Structures are given as C-alpha cells and as structure tokens.
Amino acid sequence: MNSIQKNRLKDQLFKIWGIACTLFGLVLLTVFIGDILIDGIRRIDWAFITDLPSRKAEKSGIYTALMGSIWILILTTIISFPIGVAAGVYLEEYSKKNRLSALLEINISNLAGVPSIIYGLLGLEVFVRIMSLGASVLAGALTLSLLILPIIIVATREAIKAVPKSIRDASYALGASKWQTIWNQVLPASGGGILTGVILALSRAVGETAPLIVVGALAYVPFAPSNPMDEFSVLPIQIFNWISRPQHGFIENAAAAIIILLLITFVMNGIAVYFRNKWQKKWK
Amino acid sequence: MEITMTKVKDKKSIDLDKVEQQSSTDGAKIAIKDVKVWYGDFMAIKGIDMNIKPNTVTAFIGPSGCGKSTFLRLFNRMNDYVDGFKMEGKIKLNGTNIYKKKVNVEELRKEVGMVFQKPNPFPKSIFENVAYGLKIQGIKDKKFINERVEKALKQADLWDEVKDNLKKSALALSGGQQQRLCIARTLAVEPSIILMDEPTSALDPISTAKIEDLIFELKEKYTIVIVTHNMQQASRISDYTAFFYLGELIEFDKTKTIFTNPEKQQTENYITGRFG
C-alpha cells in the first residue's frame, strides 16, 4: 500500500467515524422525542393549554405555567436585549484595548459558563431580598437576564466584528460620526447575528428551571400572572413537579408539557435561523 | 526646490514658470509642513513638506510600504482610528491646520472626500448609497436630496446606467460601476478635495479607463490626490507626481518632469522598473 492509498483509507475511516458520531446524537434525540411523543401527544388538546393546574391529572392544564413562561420571556427580552447589545457595542466599538478590557472580556466569557443555579442564588439575594421584589415574575426575569447577558454580549461582539472595515471606512470618509456609523451601518449589518444570538439566549432562558426555583417560582400557582410583581410558575417547573408525582396521569401531563416546551424552543430557533439566512442573503 | 522660488521679490525678473510655482506655495490647497508619522515605534513618514495646488491631479507613487497611503489618509484624518498612530507637523487645508484640537473631523471629511482601493458600497440601494452623506448631515428635504443624487450620479458618469434602477441593491452592480457609485457618493457631499487610494487596482482595463476619464473631468472642479501602483496611470492622468520611498518624499515635481527627466537616480530606477 503506498502513501496515497493510506491517506485515502484514513480519509474514509475518519468519514465513517464522523457519521457514527453524528448518528449517535441523532438516534438518542429521536428515541427521546419519540418516547415523549408516545407518552404525551394524546394528552395535548386545547383544554390542556387553557386549563388551570389541578390535583387530578386529567383535569390539569398548563395555562398558568405557559403564561408564566411567556411573561418571563417578554420581561427577560425587554431587560436583557438593550443592556446586552449596548454592552457588546461598547466593548467592541468604544472601549480602549488594554489590560482592563482584556480582563473584562475573559470574565464575560467565564460568566457564560457559570452554573445557572449560582445565578439563582444571586437573584435570590439581590432581587428577592435586597430589592424586595419577592418571588415575582420580575425577580425571575431579572435573574434570567443576568444568566443570558454574557451570551448576548458575546454574540453581539462577534456579529459586530464580522462587519467589514471597508464599510466603516466608507461611512467615516463621508463625514459620519462614530455613532452615526454604528447606527446606520454597523448595527444593520450585524443585526442578523445579534438577533440570532439573542433568540438562542432567550430559548435557553425559557428552558431554565434551577435559578427560578431558587428565586422562589412556585410549582403550583392557581392564577396566571397579571402584572410583573405576581407570583408565577413556568413550564419547566410544572414539568418537574408533574414528573415527581407517582400517578401515571401526571407522567402523561409532563410529556405533553415537554412537547409544548420543545415546540416553543423549536420555533424560536427556527426564527433565529430565518433571520440569519435573510441577513446573509442581503449581505453577500 | 520650489519653496525657495517664493522668496524672489523682483517679479519682473522671473519667468512665467516661476510665477506659477510661486502661486503653488501661496495658494496651495493643501500645504504640508514637516509631517512625521509613527505607528507605535515604527516611523512611517519621516518628515515631508509638500504643497498641493487646487484643481490639479497629484499622483503618489512608490513601492508598497513606502508610506504613500498613510500620507494620503492624513488629509482626511482617516489614520486617527489606527492603533498607535502618532503624528507631528502641520497640514493646512485652505490655510487652516486640520490637526488642531478644535477641528471638527466630520466637517473636515465633508470637505475632503475619499475613494478606496476596493469598491465598498453600502449594502443598500443605489439611491441610499449616494444620499447617505447628505442624510447624516440631517438633510431631510427630499427634492434637494433627489437633485443632488442625480447630479452626483451624472458627474460620476453612472446616471444613464442606473437611472431606472435606483432602488436596486448597490451590490448587484459590476465592480467598475460600484467604484463609480463610490465616487458619486463622495461627490454628493460636494467636497473640494477627493482622495483616491488605488481606485482602479481592483478593476478591469475598461472600467479603469472610465475612471481615468472621470478623474480628468473632475479636476476642473476638484483637487484630486491619487495613490497608484500603475506608472502609466500616473503619467496619463496626473499633473504632478510625488515619489515616496521608505517614508520619505524622494521627488515631487510636474509629472512630465518626473517621467522624462527626474532629478534623482532613485526615481528614475523606480519609474523605469529597475526596482520596487
């Protein structure tokens, strides 16, 4: 066997290894989703979505948890989007490149890797106790905002970095100020990337359980929140609660709720992909 | 050197050529005095004096890394954003030092437009590209903007090709059209000086010829400074030529003189292709 044949063989072997690895993930996911679908799909109907939680499995619905999740989603977006994007723009465009900014950069990347329950503890102390917001939707949303801010900041910076220098040069050369250049050229050009990052971060926030439990989200809330200071539950907590019940009916409920939650994240990721493709088309 | 000519007091005794040179120092559009530039520890420009006359085309030539682009970008302060940039000396535009603290850089750039090496239209419509410079000045008068856009596109010799598709993306244009769009975009702001940094190096010969024709027409109203690697281009389109080498201005004279009878051996070696 000469070296060309050897290389070809290695190439083939690596290809097979790669396919096997990809399939491993896909098969697991398929089995998991299939299992959930078998358990839960029959349980899903309009009543399941609009019913309040109940002690009887077959009468229970996800209305309060779903509304809680939507409240959390909206508030978290309102809080984290402007702060995260502004911080990203500042770090990338304005801050001087020195040791302090390097330190800041490393810390933000590290923060993205801190376990979410730590953020829950921080939220409990700062928002629930010190700011006395109580176990409210607002406290939960603030906590989740902290959790996803690093992701949004990193995504924003990456998106801004990808804007070609030639576009900035052109804008400056026509007499535009820094802010005009950022607002009229850099942000529209990086919008797709920023939105993708924000949506992916939010879809992570929707699935978070631990920090909200620590903050004091309840497993059983009889009413959907009507203002930011109300108590709340969210879908993942509802699922966690149902799964820990012994009756088989609740297992079905949990599976059905998981399907709804997966659907939400699926749609959000879909929107993210859509934006990315749309922006890329415009730019290339 | 030319500068010494200005000290001649007796005007009757000097010939026409000297009169012209005298006015070059007094009425210079851009007067550069002992300019030095550093990037960190690296000295990119090592003390240059130069006077650029109004309504002329001045070409900067020299091998890569000789500092000609850096020098060009001093005139609209595009080096300000480069890390480690430091500058000494004076550059006077219409008599005002543009590196004074009080100078508004945005205002300066409305006076000194720039066309870059690679066509860099904004990923917007043709119309929006040309109107951008006006919109950032806060101009909202639609009729005024429409007129300016049309005028600029006509001046850049692009109007006939795009007048029916002003809403089309600028990125759909060919490379040569994009570069003329970039020139139109610069003209719309109505600067008095246009800096061009190798504007045809990414274009085919036909597009290059169009841009060169354009430069020839534009010099009636504008002062043009162009960096080029193309000797023929410099000799075709410019009135004055400056030869740079390793951050120094080796020779600056009428283009005809530079290309037929240069004073320095280095210049001759470069333009005849013996080095660089």
Image (cartoon, coloured by chain):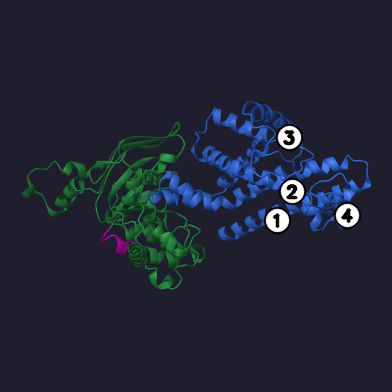
Chain colours: A blue, B green
Question: Which labelled disc corresponds to residue A270?
Answer: 1
Residue assigned mark 3? A211
Nearer the viewer's eye, disc 3 or disc 2? Answer: 2
Q: CA distance from mark 1 to mark 2?
A: 20 Å
Rounded to the nearest angstrom, the CA distance separating label 2 from label 4 is 23 Å
Q: Earlier in the sequence, mark 1 or mark 2?
A: 2
Kindly identify the residue that appears in the image at 7 percent across and 45 percent down: B10
Earlier-in-chain disc, 4 versus 3: 4
Q: Secondary structure at mark 2?
A: helix
User: Residue type at mark 3?
Assistant: Pro
Return the x and y of residue A9 as percentages of the image width and height.
85, 53
Residue A126 location in percent, x, y?
Answer: 64, 28
Q: Nearer the viewer, residue A197 or A36?
A: A36
What is the CA distance from the residue labelled 1 to the residue labelled 4?
A: 20 Å
Residue drawn at x 67%, y 30% is A128
Of the residues shown, which amino acid type is indicated by label 2?
Answer: Leu
Q: Which residues are magenta?
A: B215-221
**Residue under numbered circle 2:** A66
